[in-house]
Amino acid sequence: MEFTVTQALIIMLEKKIFNPSEIDYFLPHYSSDYFRDEVYEKMKKAGCDISQDKWFTNLSSKGNTGSASIYIMIEELFNSGCLKRGEKLLCYIPESGRFSTAFMILEVV
């Protein structure tokens, strides 16, 4: 997680790709709640403290849906009626089989 969360976020923040204070929702995919606190600690270490009350995850209701998880989370948040124009979403999508990670920023239009 040092490389897939902390180091990746440090690089993005140094390049000013986004400002953590402008993120309205953080959509993390992780396979188990075991990883939730570790993801949060690594984010804070990188200077990206997005409070957990801004996190949107459906792991407890949908389970680990693997590579479909980010799409299911986005669809569920979209249909929740909570989103407002201009809000920003930061998505964290790890892929453990190849040990690769993607971050994605979306803006509600």
Image (tube, rainbow, N blue to C red):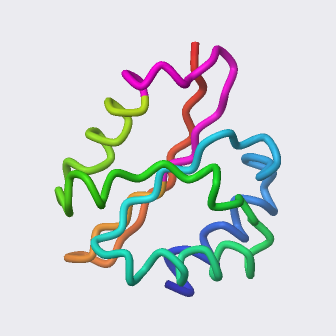
Q: Determine whether 10 is above or below 16 in the image.
A: below
The x, y position of residue 1, in whole percent, is 49, 84
**Residue at image point 69% right, 19% down:** 86
Q: Which quadrant is home to the C terminus?
A: top right
Residue that protrudes farthest toward the front in the picture: 61
Query: Horizontal placement of 33 versus 86: left or right?
Result: left
- Which image quadrant is residue 73 in? top left
- Which image quadrant is residue 39 in? bottom right
The x, y position of residue 56, in whole percent, is 48, 48
**Residue at image point 77% right, 52% down:** 20
**Residue at image point 33% right, 33% down:** 76
Counting labels gives 0
Work out whether residue 107 or residue 38 is closer to the camera in this orientation and state it: 38
Q: Determine whether 87 is above or below 27 in the image.
A: above
Q: Main secondary structure of the magenta part?
A: loop
Query: Does residue 90 show up magenta in the picture?
Result: yes
Q: Determine whether 48 is above or below 89 in the image.
A: below
The x, y position of residue 33, in whole percent, is 37, 75
The x, y position of residue 62, in whole percent, is 21, 52
Query: Does residue 82 show up magenta in the picture?
Result: yes
Query: Horizontal placement of 7 versus 74: left or right?
Result: right
Q: What is the magenta range?
A: 78-91
**Residue at image point 28% right, 39% down:** 71
